[in-house]
Amino acid sequence: MPVEHTLALITPEGMPHAKKIIFRIKKESFTILARRTVHLTPEQVSDFYHHLYGQRDFPLLVASTSVAPVTALCLGRHHAVEKLVQVVGPRDIAVAKRDALGSLNAQYGSVECNLAAVHASADPKAARREILFFFPQSQVEPWTELGEGLRWLEEHVGPLLKEGLAQMLKEKPVEPMLWLADWLLQNNPNQPQVEQHLRHHPLSKPPKY
């Protein structure tokens, strides 16, 4: 199953509790792929939260996020976006405390000022944009776990390779590696079937002058 990437942003409100927040995120089986602590300018915060522009609390959001350093976490796990949204909880702290009592925002957000402790990417498209905002060099496409890749090799490549090695031991060619490479090409199930006498001949004869 592909591992998805998402972004968690620990806001100035949540920074005093950063260790506890990160501990909880790791406990939820997230892997921290990249981490960065920065002090954003109001312009940078406005750019990051541009999709919220026009909302009544947008000026407060910009001011409160740019007042002190934040920590951005690029995270990976199965269904990362959906799971992190659940772990972080609603941005409205009153709603978080009412409907998602175990969420990070319910635990560490400010009810008085309605300031979230953690921001989570809302969907895969937002996750990609927000990860690249903080980590421009990141590879944010879904990736397959190493174990799954090894299982695929074992299931699809292993049997063919074993058969080729067995044939090579019988043939005892002068150039074993070249022989094996040619045998694998000829016996590749995805390779178009070509008559044996045409395998090593050009498709057309060169013109005579």
Image: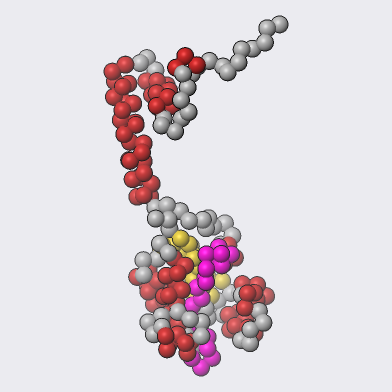
Q: Going by the image, does 66 lie left or right of 74?
A: right
At 58% from the left edge and 80% from the top edge, which residue is drawn? 65
Residue 192: image location, x then y, percent? 48, 28
At 45% from the left edge and 53% from the top edge, which residue is drawn? 143
Residue 95 falls inside the magenta stretch: no
Residue 122 falls inside the magenta stretch: yes
Q: Which residues are magenta?
A: 111-129
**Outermost residue, right side:** 209
Res. 104 image quadrant: bottom left
Q: Going by the image, does 81 lie left or right of 65?
A: left
Q: Identify which residue, 186 or 174, lies in the foreground.
A: 186
Residue 100: image location, x then y, percent? 41, 83
At 48% from the left edge and 81% from the top edge, which residue is drawn? 90
Q: Going by the image, does 127 lie left or right of 31?
A: right
Res. 157 image quadrant: top left
Compared with 82, 106 (above or below) is: below
Compared with 162, 85 (above or below) is: below
Quarter of the rendering occupied by the C terminus: top right
Residue 15 shows in the view: no
At 41% from the left edge and 75% from the top edge, which residue is drawn? 87
Q: Going by the image, does 15 lie left or right of 149?
A: right
